[in-house]
Amino acid sequence: MSFTVLHHSRLICLRTCFAGEALGIRIVPAYVTFGADLAEQAIQAAQAVTPGLEHVMCFYGVGNHGGGPTKAHVEYIRDHTHAFPGLELRFSTPERFYEAVYPSWDRLPLVTAELELQHTFPGCYSVMHDIKQSQRASENLLAQSERLIEMCVTSPDDFGDLHKNLDMAWEDLLFTQFHDILAGACIPPAYEAVRAIQGRDLISREEIIYDVTQRWARQCLPSINTRVNRFLADSATRFLLGGQA
């Protein structure tokens, strides 16, 4: 049996609601390892091989939710390439694995139901809806801010200062993007801080948008009677529209 050392096992064919099909595989026993000895990891992965196939993936690595292989892991695989009866350990990639098993597509178990392969945090794709919603709003507002700066700011100094503010906003966004935060897996008090960070992020970007559009209006639109109110409609996709009301 050819044994691809990498990270997973239990191959299936998944049929989607769009009538398409894709190969999928369940990790056995896990995608992390603790210690340099990969024997138990390799044996459990091999035992989970799909009947009739000659290939299986075995994930390894250290770190929270995966990570990179250690030098000890690499040396172990090199020293134990043929140490297990009937197995050959190979450094490989998911692409090579799927290429190897592709000819057996028709023999794989067909799954047509909803694919629920993880049971650690059921509902993590829907819980904490307000956090997910604010995160998406922040992403859109950041993209809009960046486009407006690129379109409307000509001063190198102003350009640099505004991008420094954007960098700080990005740091907030990336922090709240952490998978345990978005998945709803944190303790309740943590979300008080997350909401505060998201609020700071949203306000800072609104201030950037206001600042940029006001500067552009003062520099590019003709002066008008102060008794007339000016309405500025901005589109961050391609251009700005100036008008009066």
Image (cartoon, rainbow, N blue to C red):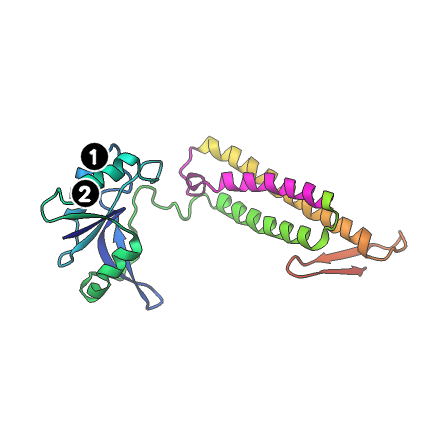
**Residue 196 part of the magenta segment:** no
Query: Does residue 115 appear in the picture of this structure?
Result: no
Give left or right: position of 235 versus 18: right
Q: Start and end of the magenta stretch?
A: 158-187
Q: Which residue is mark 2?
A: 42
What amino acid type is highlighted by mark number 1? Asp
Q: Which residue is mark 1?
A: 37
How busy is the neighbourhood of tag 2: few (under 14 within 10 Å), some, or many (20 plus)?
A: many
Classified by dominant secondary structure, the portion drawn in magenta counts as: helix
Q: Residue furthest bottom?
A: 19
Residue 69: percent from left, percent from top: 31, 39
Q: Which amino acid is tagged 2? A: Ala
Determine the residue located farthest toward the left in the rendered image: 85
The circle drawn on residue 213 is none
Place of residue 170 in the rendered image (x, y in percent of width and height, measured from the top left): 56, 42
For the point 51% across and 33% down, which residue is it?
Answer: 192
Give how far across and how far down residue 5 sits, in percent: 24, 47
| Front residue of this view, candidates 72 and 44 | 72
**Mark closest to the chain's N terminus, 1 or 2:** 1
Image quadrant of residue 223? Answer: bottom right
Q: Is residue 212 above or below residue 99?
A: above
Q: What's the residue at 68%, 48% (across, down)?
A: 209
Which residue is drawn at the image coordinates 51% and 48% (left, top)? 133
- Numbered label tally: 2
Which quadrant of the structure image shows residue 180?
top left
